[in-house]
Amino acid sequence: MASNSLFDQLDLGADGVIAKGDNLVVRLAIPSHAVMVSNGHPSIPPNRVENLSLCKAFWLGPDRMLAISEHGRIDAEFFGKDALVSDITDGIALFHISGPCWREIFVRGSAENPDGGMLDTGLCAQTLFAGLDALVHCAGPEHLVIQIERPLASFFSLWLIEATKAAQASLAAK
Amino acid sequence: MTATRLAHGGNIDRQKPITFTWNGRVMTGFAGDTVASALLANGVRIIGRSFKYHRPRGIMAAGADEPNALVDLTHGVRHEPNARATTVLLEDGMQISVIQGWPNVDWDIFGVLDLFHRFLPAGFYYKSFFKPNWGFYENAIRRMAGLGRAKTSADRRKFDARVDHCDVLIIGGGMAGICAARAAISAGLNTILVEDRPHLGGRLNWCGRVIDGMPADQWAQQIASDLNCRVLTNAVAFGYYDHNLIGVMETVQTSDPDCGDARLWQIRARHVVLATGAFERPLLFADNDRPGVMLADAALCYVRHYGVLVGDRIVIATNNDSGYESAIGLAQAGAEVTVVDIRPIAGGIQQRAEMVGVRVLPSARVIKAIGRTAVTAVDIRTNRGSHIRIDADILASSGGWSPAVHLFSQSGGKLRWDDGTLTFVPDQSPQAVRVIGAANGTFDPAASMSEAIAAINAIAPEKVSWSLPALSQTEKSVAIEALWQDPDIIGRQWVDFQNDVTFKDIALAASENYVSVEHLKRYTTLGMATDQGKTSNVIGLAIMAQLTGREIPAVGTTTFRPPFVPVSLGAMAGSRFGPLHSPLHQLPAHQSHQKLGAEFREYGGWWRPAFYPRNSEDAFATIQREAKAVRAGVGLLDASSLGKIAVRGKDAAEFLNLIYYNELAKLKTGRLRYCFLLRETGVVYDDGVVARLADDHYLLSPSSSHTKGVLDQLELWHQTEYPSMQVSFHNLTSAYATISIAGPQSRTLLARMESGIDLSDQALPHMSLTHGTMMGHKVQLARVSFTGERAYELTMPAGQGRTFWEHLMNLGQDLGITPIGIESLSLLRAEKGYILIGTDTDGLTLPVDLGMAGPLTAKKVDFVGKRSLLTPDAMRPDRRQLIGLRPTDDQFVPAVGSHAILQVDGTRRSIGWITSSAFSPHLNHTICLAMIEGGRGLVEANAHVTIFDRGKTTTARAVEACFFDQQGVRLNG
């Protein structure tokens, strides 16, 4: 995890936990390195997530992908000499929502159907979440990852805290 | 006699008493009561005063159709100024009071208005109060009329909101609804069932039928407990939107004072089944609004569901068989009941009623309710034409049933008139919706169940594997007989109770030719109250048809729009208020600005320091101080929100040259150019600096609020017009922080960063950039100014923005370094005549209006907007042009938006307006930028213009837009 003032900004501990509930943890992570790539290779099928060496690549458009590494830098050369590779490490924030009740957060932020296929393994979706442009994917069973612009991380953290409270109240009432 | 709580019966928990207050009086009810049932049980008859005439009113219905029982409700932090007593569940500690009536609801001084009703017909306010003017009377009239008052303090509670999806959404948990749900589950459909009451079953809870050998309410609860799907009770579907999106408001119990008592659901369903039931219609007779006049089914509901017998001696006026069901229930509970039926004969149910002691008067009709604050007797015209009077304390009526077609209509569905049931029923809808049961005009229970199964079979891939329950035999029924308004009845007859619309008002509308249903609604306000005319619409239409000699379908219906019931704004807002009101971007050094005491405001979607007040400085003094500091020493501005769009590719130069107004292909590497981006209309969309980083690599710097818009423009032109060009765009705004360092000491400060970058004017002249390393991080340093001073923009990874900011602030202490906000920047740039897009320009401003005509003639290649700039309109000499204005009074600062005017034939004509204005601390006089017709000609003529500012006039001299350092010595030197 990269050293960054974002954790200070959001007043988070080292584990990046924003909110916790029964069967639910919301955590902020900062990627080690993230680049946006245009006109590069390999090509990724639409709305797919591919595991490349050292990083995960997310389809963003016909000639565009986002490559995120949790452990170390991504070599720009990897994508070819004609590629436009821009370092956006400090421009994104990753929010991990995990636990059996992750859907309770999802349904408060997105109009999409979490069981409609968009979150199937190996897929990612660019969508509105809590009114923000977001890239959403499931990193595993009961593990949702939402990527947003870093300047909105503070807003989104507040939103997540409220959503977690509402989710907990709703679950408790059942 | 008043209503009494029976010793037994009802779906209430007598082990759980609840204490509440009514107008300050302590009362008790039971868990399971609504506010209305509890008030009735405590003997309350007058629940409010009518909207217009202040007539006493009592509870009329038992559900969402209640027009009278709106109350002011306070419960902890919760406050509802117009809570519908019939739908609010009673809770301990509720404080309930009337919303109209002074000094109290029983003796309302404004009740005197009723004596003057002849002078207050429909639309009286269109025909009177002309002298001196309407405004003279308006306040007093609004005070006397109207509904409850919202509190002025903010409601800080946060409401929950969520989304759900399903195969089939069933709205209405009555018999048809729960049968449909049971069938849908058996067919394997993902099902959601929504019911507005706390329990499923609807009328089954009080109709007295037997299903599968058990009482209908028990059968409903048994089925409900078996439903393996999401069941939302206390949840009302209030809106039907496109693509089968349904808005549902669920009432939730919470003890958390910070949490709202409602949850908004947005449910997207593949199929919707509407089982919304029907509303009973009242009958018209003289004084049919008196307390004690109510709907027959409501009286039955109160006795069977809440254990409240509404009266001792009850008259039921009816034109259909369902009035007898109520009569039987009430008689069984101990009331003395008389049915007044307009029909000569009823169905088999009449005999059953007579067997339990109900007296039946066939071919008779109620003509008047006697009593002022409560019904004491009923006048009846018998089948022989004679009049009789019967003592009574309740007059209940049943005029037939109107299907609740509101949601169906909102779905885009059309209605058709059904002569058999005398009502509008659903016809076709463009959406995937089916209507079943009473909502479809199907009032026979067996037929309703069959419709439910058929509806699910039509949408389920697997057939329903659930067999219908056995219903008890019902008697043969006799058809309803139309009775809309009896012309022989003398006296006022209410149609819309909540808005005080009478038969006479409709007749007046008809006589004045407001015969269109839409005109009728707006002229009389029929159906426009918070109950949306649930009990009045069909009657109103029928009366209009009767008065104009048309068939009812020819009159038509008005449009039903969401919400079906009132929905609180707080619930719609959810948690979106305060810091969550709108998503604002935060600067990387936000915390540093907070520490410096910045006052933050929103600029283009970013939360930015407006200025940094010290001690007790006001805004004006702070801005003046900050601006002076920049001109005298060095100022630091967080410019991280400025756009940063990387453009790269072999065709990048050619592409940008096509898109931008200014020449960019010839821009040298390492140099910057100030550019305009135009729309096809030639209007300036954005301005900003473009840097060339390499032959095939540019960096655009759009204004903060236009970054995404500019990116969209680039993508649009690339993807639609120039897809063969090899060029790509990345928005890097969020990834990098930018600090603007401005002032004569800016270079000195930068030199202390020990980057090794050559800061000489030769190596880094104005409008150039370079790269280097500072504090171990790669940085970009551009020499560019928006203040007119020597200035640099230092860009680094966003994560380092705060560290760099604080380091620079420390390094510049002895130089008098001053953090500056957007407001002082705006003053400094106005002194130089630099524009802000959207402030100094509008949707008509062309580059030539801003004095930038050069590229139009010098640039040889085509570009976006060029053709529009060559039209005659674009070259008119009298176009509004950007100039400076110097008011004659040096100290007077005209408001932005003040117009420059000409006096023409004694009237004022605007020739433009002020776009920016401020007092310049360096020039010691006011400066203004303005867009003025033929402005440059006025400057050349050294002319004066008249400024009209908030009712006062002053003069100003037309001058060049640049007030300060016109030679640019400070900028370049």
Image: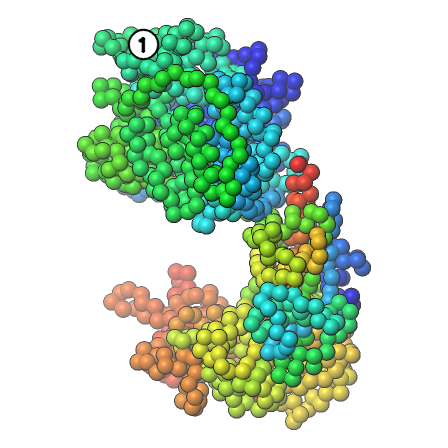
Question: Tag 1, which secondary structure?
Answer: strand
Instruction: Quadrant for the C terminus of chain B, please.
Output: bottom right
Pinpoint residue B719: horizontal percent, then vertical percent: 48, 75
Pinpoint residue B190: horizontal percent, then vertical percent: 56, 42
In percent of the image, x 57 and y 74: which residue is there?
A: A63
Instruction: Using the rendered view, name the quadrant where residue A145 is placed.
Output: bottom right
Pinpoint residue B342: horizontal percent, then vertical percent: 29, 16
The answer to which of B310 and B162 lies nearer the viewer is B162
In percent of the image, x 32 and y 80: which residue is there?
A: B871
Residue type for callout 1: Leu
Vertical placement of residue A134 versus B473, above or below: below
Instruction: Using the rendered view, name the quadrant where residue B489 is placed.
Output: top left
Vertical placement of residue A132 versus B493, above or below: below
Judging from the image, mark 1 belongs to the subunit labelled B
The answer to which of A19 and A103 lies nearer the viewer is A103
Residue at the spot of label 1: B361
Pinpoint residue B725: horizontal percent, then vertical percent: 51, 82
Instruction: Using the rendered view, name the quadrant where residue B960 is placed.
Output: bottom left
